[in-house]
Image (tube, coloured by chain):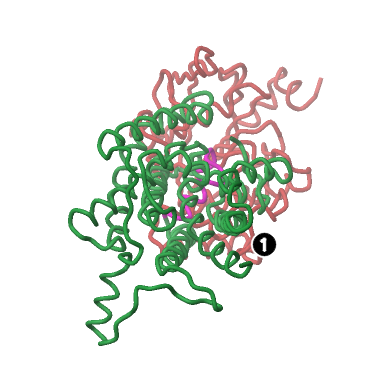
Amino acid sequence: MPTETPLLSTRAVEARYGRMQVLWGVDIDIQPGETILLLGANGAGKTTFLKTLVGLLPASAGVISFAGEDIAHLRADKRMRRGIAYMSELGVFPDLTIEENIRIGAQALSTRAARDKAEDMYALFPVLKEKRSGLASSLSGGQRKMLGIAKALAADPRLLVMDEPSAGLSPLFVGEVVRTLGALRGRGLAMLIAEQNIGFLGIATRVYVLEGGRIGFSGTVAAMEGDEALRKAYFGLK
Amino acid sequence: MLTYSLLAGLLFGLYFSLVGLGLNLVFGVMRIVNLAHGDFLMLGAYCAFWLYTLFGVDPVFAIPVAFVLFGLVGLPLYYLLVPRLLAARDPEMLSIILFFGLSQVIEALATIAFGTSEQSIPGGDLGRALREGWGRLTGHEIESGPVEIFGQSFPSAWIISGVASLIAVALVYLYLYRTRTGYLTRAVMSRRDEALATGIDVNRVSAIAFGIGIALAAVGGVFAPFMLGSITPAMGVDSTVVSFAVIVMGSLGNPLGTVLGGLVYGVSYMLVQSYLSSWANLLPYLLLIAILLVRPSGLLGKRVRLA
């Protein structure tokens, strides 16, 4: 288990929609540069947890700290400026061009820096450069995910939070997304990927499993593979 | 007669584009229905009227005054009303009720303040200060009389109104497509939830759009004495209905579609005025029903009709 000060840390985080409590005492730690996979079935509370982390849903209890600062009271835009970028399941603005999507990701930067950042993103995702003036809605599902990642990265985040980047993609495109995210490791960027797809295990440093709004497992990929119940649930093994 | 109706229809169409533009911007960004839109237009009209009556201010100079004044009114009004509305379960339905109430309050207060008599400004006084200034500068007087286009005569106020409306549409276009806040506004129009997720300060962007929407209504009001003949505190409801007809025809939620809706409405309005004048008051309602039955997504066909 890592021992240095976590980049992101949550303690006893709870969240609710009206009277319905969805998260129950969730604790996670993410170190700088780590890639964390948050696994869970539909309805386990993954999206709710991510929304609580990035400020789209208020935590009803608990502590959320980022780089040592308590951010639980901050609005989403303030958290983004602290260095947390969020890629939702949709991830892009379909009615805006690819260039505009990336520029919006870089909204906190000056106009010139945002332009430079867009060029950086085109270097990382050349397919987007060819279509930079086209609408995001004209992209294929896989390309939209690339744009979603580029838009989030344009904010120069220290933590990239992603909600089911494989959603709606064929296995071929899922592999492409996994390779893209794998290539981002080693740049000092921490990633938190909420997924049902175990295809992302290959790039994960550690895994949390969310079950019924509670953390049911936390540990390394190897430890997860050694857990019989999880093997059955996620690998279909007996 | 037909040429006159078509050309006058285009001039009125440009004006109606301006009338509907702010309403569509507000709907596009917030997905709420501002039924008090026409009442802000009425207040803009009285702003021009009193500046003219009390201080002799050329209504052309009332345009920036109305824009800034009502823009500044719109910002706090947004924070007072809209965030609570958007937090409700059915913000669209609630917005109809709330803004209908606001419309009634504005009309009642305006009636107390201004009375029920119709007021107007002589058409030739629109742009008089500009004409005089030009005359002093160049030594050539510009007549305030009718302007001839393709052999047809039109009041100069109609031309000024049409040109001002075109400029307003162009400025809104530049704002939306060439400024940073503009493309953040379009991002909110595209997907409000995604805008929040991207860390856009959606309330700030929406408040600015709301302020601009109300300011545009007020600017539309400045030209009302010349385009609609006279002004009264009760004119707000009719202006709101016309605005709705225009934006539903163009494309709900797409401010630039308003221009198409405005032109179609303007030409239809003048054709009906010329050939079936007793039907003219029915026109906005008939067009609304027709477009909803035949092409509910508007002439531009954008899929944004949620209300």
- Secondary structure beneath dot 1 equals helix
Whole-percent x, y for residue B184 in the image: 46, 51
Instruction: Report how many numbered discs are placed on residues in the image.
Output: 1
Look at the image and say whether residue B218 sits in the magenta stretch.
Answer: no
Please give the range of residues in magenta: B181-195
Chain to which the residue tagged by mark 1 belongs = A
Q: Is residue A175 left or right of residue B38?
A: right
Q: What's the amino acid at mark 1?
A: Val
Whole-percent x, y for residue A34 in the image: 52, 40
Whole-percent x, y for residue A88 in the image: 58, 39
Q: Which chain is red?
A: A
Q: Quadrant of residue A219?
A: top right
Instruction: Determine which residue is flagged by label 1.
Output: A127
Magenta region, main secondary structure? helix
Image quadrant holding the C terminus of chain A, namely top right
Counting other residues with Cα less than 10 Å from the Cα at mark 1, is it few (<14), some (14-19), or many (20 or more)? few
